[in-house]
Image: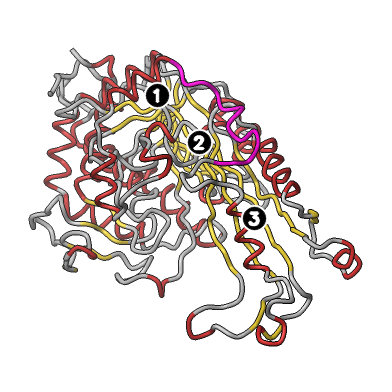
Amino acid sequence: MRWKLGLVFVFLAAPVWADAVDVARAYRTAHASEILGRYVELLAIPNVHSDLPGIRKNADYLVERFRERGVSMKLLTLEGAGPIVFGEMRRPGAQRTLGIYVHYDGQPTDPADWTTSGPWTPALYTGRHDEGGKQIPFPKAGETVDPEWRIYARSASDDKAPLIALLTVLDAFREQGIAPAWNIKFLFDAEEENGSPHLEEYLSTYRQEVDDVDLWLFCDGPMHASRRAQVVFGVRGIVSLEVTVYGANRPLHSGHYGNWAPVPGMRLAHLLASMKDESGRVLIEGFYDTAAPVGDEERAALARLPSYDAELRRQLGLAATEMDNALLAEQLLLPSLTIRGLTSGSTGELARNVIPQNAVTTIGARLVAGNDPDHMMDLVEAHIRKQGFFIVREDPDLDTRLTHAKIAKVERLRGTPAARTPMSNPIAREVIASVNRVLEEPALQVPTMGGSLPIYVFTGLLQKPVLILPIANHDNNQHAENENLRLANLWYGVDVFASVLAGAEAAE
C-alpha cells in the first residue's frame, strides 16, 4: 500500500508535495550501479573492531560521505576507544528527534576460510554461492541490477548495509529537495562486535548530544526467516565464561598412561553434559527462575507470527530441534546455554597418541529480561562446584594440583543484560506505521531478537525507547566466512528509511 505524503520542509525551491518512498525508489533504480560502487568502497576498508587504524579509516570515510550530504558531522572520542561517528540534521519546526544507531565495526575473520574473494575484496554473485550462484562483474552505469544478486564481504550484512541505505535516501531527498520530518541524530558505533565496552561512558560523557532524542532506531540484525520484514522491541543479553579443566602437568603417552591418568577432554565432556539434558533443557539450578514472565502483548505478538519452524529446519538440515521442536520465537524469550567452542589436543592429521594437559571450552549464555549477568554466571559456577570441581582464576600451581582432584579455571567475560521496549510505545507505533507503508504485508512485530545489542544503555542510562529495524537477509552468514547481503534487502532498506524519515505525521 502506498500513502501520499503531506507537507514537508524543503531544502531548495522544490515541489511542496512529494511521495518520499517513490522518490527513493526512483533514485535507487536510476543509480543502482553507483550505489553498489559506493557500497564496495566502504566494504573494502577493513573494520575489525580491534584494528584502531582501520576503524579510524572507516570513521573518516563516514564523516566525509555524510557531511557531503548536508549532515553536521563529528567524531566523539575517548582514550583507547574506537571513535563514535556522530551526525545531526535539524528541521526547523520539528517537534521530535529520531536517533539512528548503526555500528560500523566487524567481526574478525580468517581470509583463508572464505571461498569467495575474501572479507575485504567485495564480490558480486548471481545468488548464494553455495547454491549455484556465479561470480559476475559489478554492473556499469545504466546496466540492469537483479535484486537477487548478492554482495559478499565482511560486514556486507552486519552492519554496513544500513549506512549505504541511509546515504542513498539522503541523496534521493536532496535531489528532490525533501527534508526529514524529524530532527535526526546519527550515532555510529565502532565497538559493537566487542560488546560496546565504552558505549555507556560515551553516552555519559556526551549526554548533551543525545538527551533530546525521543526514540532510538537500531538498524541491525536479519529479517524474519520467511523473508518477511520485521520490527523488534528487544534483544537478549549475553554472558560468556571460559572454563579450563586439567589433567597431568605435562602431556602423557596414551599407551603408557591410558586407564590411569585423568583425561581432561573426558572430564570436560562429563561436566558439559551435566548442564543440559538431551532435550536441550538447562539443568543448572535456578537458570530459568529470574526470567521475566511473558506479558499479554508479547503472547499476542507471538501468536501472529507465521508458522515457519518446519521450513527453517528443512533449510538447515535438522530433523529435530531442542525442547521437542518448541517454537523458535518462544525459545528466544528464555535464557539459553551454548557451547561456543571446545579444544583439547589435536585432531585429523595432527592427532597424536597423547593425553593432553587440559581441555578448554567457552560457554555462552543468552539472557532475557529479568536475568542479571553476574547472577547468571554465579549459577554456572555453582553448578561447576556441585560437580566436584575446585574453581581457580589462574592456572593452578603444584600444591593446588596435589590438593584437589578436579580443578576448573573459570574466566568471566564481560556480560550485558537483556532489554526491551514496551510494544505499546506510541512513538514506536508511529515508526511501525511508516515501515508498513512500503510493504505489501505489515511487518511482523517481534518482542525479542535472539542476538544481543547494546540497547540496554539507551533504555537504562538514557531512559529512552528503542525499536530495532533489521534489513539484512536471514541467510547472510553473519559473523562467519562468506558473509553476504541480498540486494533486494538493500533496496528494502532504502525504501523503509525513506518512509521512516518522511515521518508518520506526513501521511494522509
Q: Quadrant of residue 259?
A: bottom right
Q: Position of residue 478 (x, y in %)?
A: 38, 53
Q: Nearer the viewer, mark 3 or mark 2?
A: 3
For label 2, the residue is: 236
Q: Nearer the viewer, mark 3 or mark 1?
A: 3
For label 1, the residue is: 183
Classify 10 Å Cα crowding around label 2: few (below 14), some (14-19), many (20 and above). Answer: many
Residue that appears at 22% across and 60% down: 128
Judge by depth and name the residue closer to the eye, 196 or 501: 196
Q: Quadrant of residue 198?
A: top right
Q: Which mark is residue 271?
A: 3
Q: CA distance from mark 1 to mark 2?
A: 29 Å
The answer to whether 489 appears left or right of 428 in the picture is: left
Span of residues in magenta: 282-295
Residue type of the residue flagged with mark 2: Arg
Total numbered labels: 3
Q: Quarter of the image containing the C terminus?
A: top left
